[in-house]
Amino acid sequence: MERINKSIFMEHFKKGTWTKNTYIVSELTRRNGDVIADQFTLQNRIHAESQCITRLKQTISVDEVVSLTWYISWTPCNVCADEIIAFLHQYPNVTLQIHAARVYYHENQLMREGLRRLRDNNVAISIMGWRDYVSLWQTYGDSTEEIRRNEVYEGNPLDFEDILTTILQQ
């Protein structure tokens, strides 16, 4: 996977940035410990989640035991949530953890229901904390530059952790 430069990282993962496109860094861990990483963003109106699922279907077998971790700029929309759930039903030995920078249209009832459907289908969803940012940057970012906490959290008027917790408790 190509390393992420700082401007792309900040454009998509900075808490106070309201970019239109979702960006995913997907980390697939096989049972033997091998890790395959890839990155996706909206292309030709195809959501990043859909592109990632398409690639995963080309990479793993239906009965393979794998763990997926997604670092994602926005939580999935309700349509992508259903696509993720269908994928997980088709690939029952896949577990998915989603670490999101922000909650997508958190006041929209359809989006909220999509997140709850993910939760109900054993997808672990959380808001990225500082440790997640550091891990993501150190593993996949351009190591010639550093990120600082104040850069990542600057301009964020919302507490996405509280928002997500409220949505998932309903």
Image: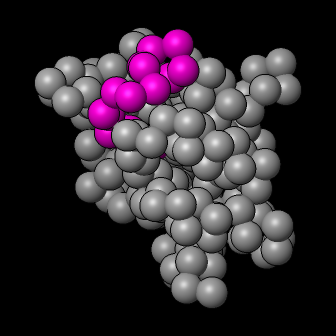
Residue 32 placed where, x, y %? Answer: 14, 24
Instruction: Tell me which corner region of the image, top left, top right, bottom left or bottom right, holds residue 30.
Output: top left
Q: Seen from this angle, which residue lies furthest left? A: 32
Residue 158 placed where, x, y %? Answer: 61, 74
Quadrant (top left/top right/bottom left/bottom right) for the C terminus: bottom right
**Residue 149 horizontal side relative to residue 99, left or right:** left
Residue 65 placed where, x, y %? Answer: 30, 33
**Residue 103 horizontal side relative to residue 109, left or right:** left
Query: Which residue is depicted at the point 53% across and 43% down?
Result: 88
Query: Which residue is depicted at the point 28% across and 46% down?
Result: 134
Quadrant (top left/top right/bottom left/bottom right) for the N terminus: top left
Query: Which residue is depicted at the point 47% across and 57% down?
Result: 123
Instruction: Tell me which corner region of the image, top left, top right, bottom left or bottom right, holds residue 41.
Output: top right
Instruction: Tell me which corner region of the image, top left, top right, bottom left or bottom right, holds residue 129.
Output: bottom left
Q: Which of the pair 118/12 is nearer the observer?
A: 118
Q: Which of the pair 95/45 is nearer the observer?
A: 95
Residue 168 placed where, x, y %? Answer: 56, 77
Q: Which residues are magenta?
A: 56-71
How is this picture coloured?
Answer: one colour
**Residue 45 horizontal side relative to residue 162, left or right:** right
Q: Is residue 123 visible?
A: yes
Query: Which residue is depicted at the point 53% across and 60% down?
Result: 121
On screen, residue 116 above or below 125: below
Q: Is residue 148 visible?
A: no
Q: Is residue 146 magenta?
A: no
